Image: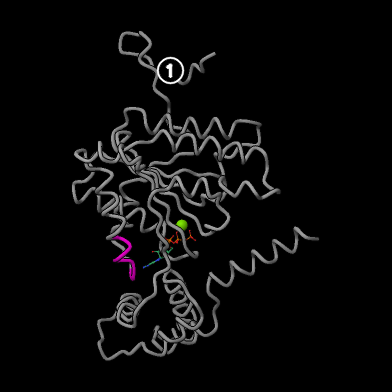
Amino acid sequence: MKNKSMIRRGRLGEPAAEEPLMPGFLTQISPATLAHEGSRKLFGLEAEMKQLSAFAQLCLDPNRREELARLDIYPTALLYGPPNSGKTSLARQLFLSAKQGNLLSSKAKLYSVDLSILLDPELGQSSRNVDQLFAFLTGKRGPSFLIIDELDAICTSRDNTNEHDGVRRTMTSFMLCLDQIRASSQLVVIGITNMIRLIDAAVVRRFFFRLEIDPVLSLESFSEYCRYLLNTKNDDMHFQSAHEAFLKKGFSVGDLRSVAARALIRASLHGKQLSVAELIISLQEERSTRDQTKDNAQSYRRRQDD
Ligand SMILES: Nc1ncnc2c1ncn2[C@@H]1O[C@H](COP(=O)(O)OP(=O)(O)OP(=O)(O)O)[C@@H](O)[C@H]1O
Ligand SMILES: [Mg+2]
């Protein structure tokens, strides 16, 4: 029995061709959010952006569809790397640059799926949600990008015996849906994860372009980012010691903004301005998200073993 809410009526009250409604776990990223994203420069990711753009160009070029089909190339990319390294920001900026470079029409849309909502405790519902998601995105919707953040939530390895049966089924549906996507579907799927090692090899294989995102900032880029965060153009400021502390503690590029934010708060508590010295103190005192994530994973494993 067809769900009535899934059928949209035509103008004269006749049933129109069935068109799925946008599912609740899918969000269209608003132009305002995208404009904000576009105004933020990403540091240390220029080479990654170039590679991703080349892949997007290949997938979106209508003259190359036959070639892509012959080689069975799917328009799917997987970004992986430590937390706070810029994966989500890069995926969004890729969409923006594809629009600006006219690879995508101005009507193209960027979607993001919330897997915590998609995963449903009712047996079989998560798999149906996956089917509904792809039916919506590939149905005459025009070109679009789909970002699937935290992909590990539905695609952990089948060897993982702790994995819930429902999650496994969801992953199987997801793989089947990915198999249906072709360049002609006009849908580019970008999966993102912090934990590539947990993801099933069969899922990883379905992402044709895989890119590690773990930018290392040169002193020059680090100084440029710090000058931006400190809102200064002062060339006499030197960031060498801060850069050394940053590298030694394994901070991600994204950590730098929060470290600077806390340094600013501390400086203002002492009635001071944010300075390089304050930044260095924060870098020495704080812990990187990479370390925090490792600790969380270890205590999770300990709890599982108890
Ligand atoms: N390379 C970078 N250059 C400038 N800012 C960055 C960079 N990487 C991250 N940031 C900033 O850090 C914050 C987090 O970035 P983002 O969400 O893209 O990271 P992520 O890798 O997706 O993190 P997570 O794995 O936790 O989801 C954002 O405010 C972003 O602007
Ligand atoms: Mg992210």
Which residue reaches farthest right? 306
Residue at left offset 48%, top offset 20%: 5
- Few, some or many C-alpha atoms within 10 Å of disc 1 (few <14, some 14-19, many ≥20)? some
Residue at left offset 34%, top offset 36%: 182
231 shown above or below 137: below
185 shown above or below 290: above
Looking at mark 1, is its residue's CB closer than 8 Å to ligand 2?
no
Report x, y in % for residue 153.
57, 48
Mark 1, secondary structure of its residue: loop
Report x, y in % for residue 187.
34, 39
The boundaries of the magenta stretch are 43-49
Colour scheme employed for the rendering of this structure:
one colour
Residue at left offset 44%, top offset 84%: 279
As shown in the figure, which amino acid type bears the numbered disc 1?
A: Ile
- Tell whether 293 sits left or right of 301: left
Q: What is the quadrant of the C terminus in the image?
A: bottom right
Q: Quadrant of residue 141?
A: top left
> Is residue 26 part of the magenta span, yes or no?
no
Report x, y in % for residue 112.
42, 45
Residue at numbered disc 1? 7
Residue at left offset 30%, top offset 13%: 11
Closer to the camera in the image, 17 or 80: 80
> Is residue 48 part of the magenta span, yes or no?
yes
Which residue reaches farthest front? 70
Closer to the camera in the image, 105 or 204: 204
112 shown above or below 227: above
Report x, y in % for residue 241.
41, 90
